[in-house]
Image: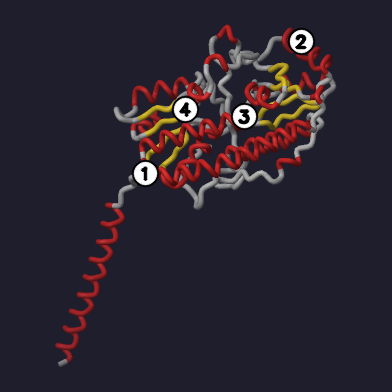
Amino acid sequence: MHIISRVVRFSALAMIALIFTACGGDEKSSQTSTKDDRLRVVTTVSPITSIVENVGGLRIRLEGVVPEGVNSHTFEATPSMAKLISQADLIILNGLFLEQPTLALAESNKKEEAVILSLGEKTVSPEEWQFDFSFPESAGHPNPHLWPDPNLGLRYAELVHEQLVAMDPENADYFSDNLNRFRTNVDDMDQAIRAAVATVPESSRKLLTYHDSWAYFAREYGMEVVGAVQPSNFSQPSVKEVAALIDQVKELDLPAVFGSEVFSSDVLEAIANDAGTKFVDDLADDDLPGKPGDLEHTYLGLIKQNMIIMIPALGGDASSMNGVDTANVFDGVSDAVYPQ
């Protein structure tokens, strides 16, 4: 009787274990077989990654390839990027000669059916190209920094929306809802910038920076870029060029000159000291505030931060920025990758 009881208990335990194993095996099999059918999208600089993230939200797999805080003009594509690009359905670049090594890598490694979307060429015509101190017309490459003007950033978002809808029409409504929310926030930002610039004395609406990232912004908002320290070949300026810039700062009586988080600004600091003006070194053009996952780590967060830095330094009031929503427009937390 005891033997039979032990056999029954053993059989029952064995059956439970078998059922548990089978269930666990099914679960593992189910997890393994789950396929992520979202579009795989690769982007370059972080402001573009953020714009794409706001339109695509949770319905795309998104990864940027240019680390934040590096010089995107001289960034060399790495071999490990080739595999990532080879798996992408959509590769999105700024264009206008900003990311030539990455473009070459994409053209030689992409899937046959993959799409390369170059935003700059579809946003401004050659007649609208801006040439300046860092990007002289003689070199033939226009200033590629369109995104500091949020109106052009919105055009980027519209182009991204068109491409995502064409490639994934089942999620068209989702992409459109995100774009509409993003458009509302950009419109609010645009009005806030205009209000802030209006508080800057007209004689002070001038920008002298280390690297020239503000050509399109200045054109849109009634400011003037009067100079940039960094020559077009990204070398250090000559002694003669530095002396000329010091004279220019004194002549224009500039309230501040602006460096960058990315580019070394020792020369510009020396110019500011010799000219007796304020040196501000924390503007950014492609390094989003905070860290990935932070509420302010967005494209509009970058614009807001720059205005809060720039406008008071020029003698204006940036309080119009306070109510502008800069968070991502979609619900949930995406798995977008921003390399650091």
- Whether residues under marks 3 and 1 lie with C-beta atoms below 8 angstroms apart, the answer is no
The residue singled out by tag 2 in the image is 244
- Residue toward you, 283 or 221: 221
When the figure is inspected, residue 231 is found, relative to residue 150, above or below; the finding is: above
Tell me where residue 43 appears, x and y as whole percent. Answer: 46, 33
Tell me the residue at 41%/31% (across/down). Answer: 91
Q: Amino acid at mark 1?
A: Arg
When the figure is inspected, residue 52 is found, relative to residue 222, above or below; the finding is: below
Sort mark 4 into few (<14), some (14-19) or many (20+) by Cα contacts within 10 Å.
many
Q: Amino acid at mark 3?
A: Asp
Q: Secondary structure at mark 2?
A: helix
- Figure colour scheme: secondary structure
Give the CA distance from mark 4 to mark 1.
20 Å
The residue singled out by tag 4 in the image is 93
- Determine which of the numbered discs, if any, sits on residue 97 in the image: none
Q: Amino acid at mark 2?
A: Ala
Of the numbered discs 1 and 2, the one sitting upstream in the chain is: 1
Nearest to viewer (mark 1 / mark 2): 1
Tell me where residue 8 appears, x and y as whole percent. Answer: 17, 84
Of the numbered discs 2 and 3, the one sitting upstream in the chain is: 3
Of the numbered discs 4 and 2, the one sitting upstream in the chain is: 4
Give the CA distance from mark 4 to mark 3.
17 Å
